[in-house]
Image: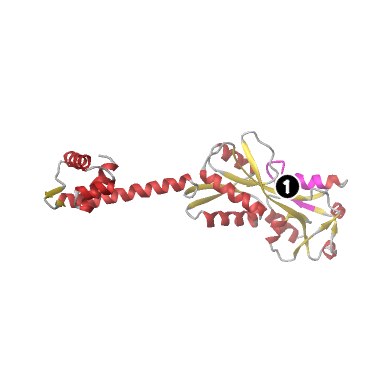
Amino acid sequence: MDLRHLRYFVAVAEEENIGRAASRLHISQPPLTRQIQQLEEELGVTLFTRTPRGMTLTQAGELFLDEARNIRALVEQATERTQRAGQGKLGRIDVAIFGSAILDAIPKLLLAFRNRHPDVKVVLHTMTKAEQIEALRQRRISVGFNRMLAPLEDLETRQVTTEKLLLAVRADHPLARLESIPFAELQHHPLVLFPTGARPSFIDKVIGLCSERGFQPKISQEVGDAVTGVALVAGGFGVCLVPESATTLQFPGVVYAPLSDTPPNFHVDLSCLYRKGDASPILAAFLQTVAEYGKS
């Protein structure tokens, strides 16, 4: 038995006439009659009572009609779901996140993707840069977000956005009284840096910016993330350069101030990374959302 047998049977049962069913199916009557006979032989039951006026379902035929319709509905549903999965509209995508971008850019991007593809389940994983790279290679995630990504032979990167940098400083700190803080002022104050872990990282970015202006920063603490960094600023441990997305962190007594006379590269990129050659339709749909977010 195949799906064609079911389609032929349903047509005959609904039309109650071989001629009308054959016309509906765009075939001639003799092959349709043979197909119904073969189906009855295969099942070992009589599905129709033949009368001069047409075809009437037997009790067994009525039961089989219900089952045939259910089977066809399941096949149609499976076909539709498969087609939607092939178009990147159904399924699951595992996304790794890390860093201050989760405070602003990443949630906005994920919301835009969910609104466009509500039937794709987005599963988030918090991972460091090294963990993301390993998870991509092991196919445990499809895409990750991070900063300061060095080129890798087996992975692709795509820039999501660029953020300017601001200085997190206590409201009662002398620098907070300045309308715009000269970058060179940082050499006179202890700096809280983040994140610890795999290098290069944002720590190297800040140290490099200071070196470009001819001084080495006085490092107060190196911590794991922006939240801890700004919390230490609130506690009086120093000042902290942060991407603009981190300014959503509102700690009592902490303000975010712009700097002047900054180096040309006084910004930081957020990028996503994924496996080269990954042909997943869901990943393609996700990257399309990334591209459109970057243009907004």
- The magenta region covers 191-209
The residue positioned 27% from the left and 49% from the top of the image is 24
Tell whether position 276 is magenta: no
The colour scheme is secondary structure
Instruction: Give how far across and how far down residue 231 sits, in percent.
Output: 71, 58
Count of numbered marks: 1
Query: Is residue 221 at all visible to an observer of this figure?
Result: no
Q: In the image as oriented, which residue stretches furthest toward the left?
A: 52
Left or right of 100, for residue 53: left
Q: Percent x, y for residue 175?
A: 84, 61
- Residue 213 picture location, percent across and down: 87, 47
Looking at the rendered structure, the secondary structure element under dot 1 is helix
What's the residue at 35%, 49% (across, down)?
76
Q: Could you tell whether 14 is left or right of 250 in the image?
A: left
Residue 145, position as x, y percentages in the image: 63, 47
Instruction: Classify 10 Å Cα crowding around label 1: few (below 14), some (14-19), many (20 and above).
Output: many
Q: In the shown orientation, is residue 59 left or right of residue 86?
A: left
Q: Reply yes or no: does residue 195 show up in magenta.
A: yes
From the image, which quarter does the C terminus lie in?
Answer: bottom right
Whether residue 134 can be seen here: yes
Q: Amino acid at mark 1?
A: Phe
* Residue bearing the label numbered 1: 202
Q: In which quarter of the view is residue 141 placed?
A: top right
Q: Residue furthest top?
A: 153
Quarter holding the N terminus?
A: top left
Judge whether 99 appears above or below 177 on screen.
Answer: above
Tell me which residue sits at (68%, 37%) in the image: 151
Residue nearest the observer in this picture, 82 or 148: 82
* Residue closest to the eye, 31 or 57: 31
